[in-house]
Image (cartoon, coloured by chain):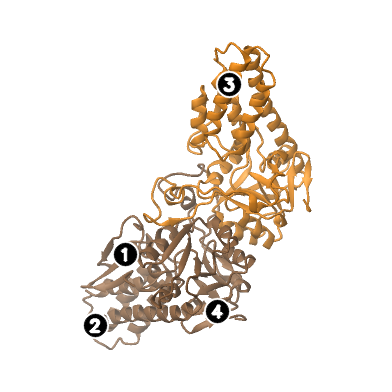
Chain colours: A orange, B brown
Amino acid sequence: MSLKTIYWENNRCMLIDQTLLPGEFKELEIKTAEAMVEAIKMLRVRGAPAIGIAAAFGIYLGIKDSSAQTGEIFQDEVRKVAALITSARPTAVNLFWAADRINALVASHTKSSVSGLKSMVLAEADQIIDEDTAICNKLGDYGAALLKNGCTVLTHCNAGGLATASYGTALAPVYKAKEQGKTIHVFADETRPLLQGARLTSWECMRNGIDVTLICDNMAASVMAKGWIDLVIVGTDRVAANGDFANKIGTYGVALLARAHKIPFYVAAPFSSIDTAIKTGREIPIEERDPEEVACGFGKRTAPNGVKIYNPAFDVTPAQYVTGFITERGILNPPF
Amino acid sequence: MSLKTIYWENNRCMLIDQTLLPGEFKELEIKTAEAMVEAIKMLRVRGAPAIGIAAAFGIYLGIKDSSAQTGEIFQDEVRKVAALITSARPTAVNLFWAADRINALVASHTKSSVSGLKSMVLAEADQIIDEDTAICNKLGDYGAALLKNGCTVLTHCNAGGLATASYGTALAPVYKAKEQGKTIHVFADETRPLLQGARLTSWECMRNGIDVTLICDNMAASVMAKGWIDLVIVGTDRVAANGDFANKIGTYGVALLARAHKIPFYVAAPFSSIDTAIKTGREIPIEERDPEEVACGFGKRTAPNGVKIYNPAFDVTPAQYVTGFITERGILNPPF
């Protein structure tokens, strides 16, 4: 994997500005917590795991030049920066998860020196990257075993390297299978309205030497009917205790179409995305986004002024449509 | 219906330039056969019935100033203009149908005066409009009986007034039900890649006082799961003898999703769209269009340069997913 979505180098955080893809590949140097908030808010960095990493580095950027004299004062500064960072996208659970982790770390070491605490925060951010990398690796290995040489995977949205620190989740099995010498084809749903499939998945597949074909979301049924798809792999934002899961809008439809064509449907899900506090998918809140994303997402207004638009960002797929969850501990099959 | 998609007035053909919708409502004055070819080619006028009408007027424009002295010479001129018009979109069956009809009319009256023949051609074009209007009217009446007050219809692409001379096909039942005093809601799939649903269906529904909500194609499954959709009505480009039918790409997926949610799925189909020479949907040829429609259809490139793209314009839905065909002679239920 040549792609590094987000990493630390020479005292600043480097990240690929995903809003410019696929037209331009540009790495941003993020040097302040405020710049990180802007990057998260504007979706320059996106994808649940990548956003957790961005939060951790963002907090470090906010406190690395602190002149606090005591661990208690420093702890207070960390909390303030963490609150600033989590305000960037209030619904992104990984922001809170990373901020909580760093707050807890500092809270349990307030007797340490401030310089020692600073190092601990940076080390924790690095640790989050390492853990994410390890999870994607393992998940990819388990998933790759599902992929036969020459097979074709359909995916929706982007749960690839650009959404994580390394292999991604849904695309990790594809990349791992390629490393094992298999030829894998990918069909990427463009994923309206924000086109993460067209802009990001097809871009990173091409960059990593994977044969990828882009389709509009409404073509998935046709390519399945033609027998071109061997299995579907998607990512997830949250899995309920019963196996229902939320993912990018359109995923539920793909699951129904896969079932109608008897195509296995897998969800790549790190254990961290399983929320056992939520019993079924009905309890997962669904974010509705700005109608303008649908009405004029391409630099040109393509719907009448004032037309009513429904724009949910996610949908929930019932567990009954899931063939298996690909996790870092192996494939989980029903019942979940 | 205040909307007149295409009509004859003051010696020229007037038509709404649909490429400018929804941003701008502009009627074009088409004064020559060449201008009509351009309008058809550029999709300024589209939709199977509307294109048949455009072809008829286009032929008349090409011969109305003919100085032919005999019916035979005139017949030859008509044939040449007809060939020019049908070259505009070689796969559009209605172009050929209208051209054949006018060629046959002239061929059977070569003993008439040239001025008489000219009048006959114009009268035939008017006749095609009248027939289309009558068909849409009747089809709409039969379809309206399926719609209960307060119900919600999901449609895909545009098979509304903009695709015909008047009420449209799939939208005719909605307009007729409204005239009967019913309140009908419409969900319009935006219909990638060319967004006929966003640009045309939502525009004409708003203009005709129909409550319409625009969604991306990949949101249809979600709104069905919410119980918001009472029935689906789509148009068709061609129906095979066994009831399989071709329509805009994405229709097949909508049919599968409707079946999964036990939602009735109707196809508005004038008898002229039934092609008994074709036994099953497998024999219907599927046009593949320019990948650029997917990669940069809206003035901005949204996919990587050189990415492989599959862009079929239509798909085929097997008859088993059709609850009924709404025709000008009534509702046809299976077996077909």
Chain letter of disc 3? A
Which quadrant is the N terminus of chain A positioned in?
top right
Mark 4 or mark 1, earlier in chain: 1
Res. B171 mark = none
Q: Position of residue B316 (x, y in %)?
A: 57, 67
Please tell me which residue lies in front, A263 or A103: A103
Q: Position of residue B238 (x, y in %)?
A: 51, 73
| Crowd tier of the residue under label 3, counting other residues whose Cα lies within 10 Å: few below 14, some 14–19, many 20 or above | some
Q: Secondary structure at mark 3?
A: helix
| Residue named by callout 1 | B16
Q: Secondary structure at mark 4?
A: loop
Res. B277 mark = 4
Mark 1 or mark 2, earlier in chain: 1
Above or below residue A51? Residue B271 is: below
Query: Could you tell me which residue is drawn at 42 percent across and 49 percent down?
Result: A296
Query: Is A306 on the left or on the right of A105, as rendered?
Result: left
User: Is label 4 in contact with label 1 (beta carbons under 8 Å)?
Assistant: no
Residue type of the residue flagged with mark 2 = Val
Residue type of the residue flagged with mark 1 = Ile
Alpha carbon of mark 3 to alpha carbon of mark 1: how far?
Answer: 65 Å
Alpha carbon of mark 4 to alpha carbon of mark 3: how far?
Answer: 79 Å
Alpha carbon of mark 1 to alpha carbon of mark 2: how far?
Answer: 31 Å
Q: Secondary structure at mark 1?
A: strand
Query: Is B18 on the left or on the right of B213, as rendered?
Result: left
Above or below residue A72? Residue B322 is: below
| Residue named by callout 3 | A76
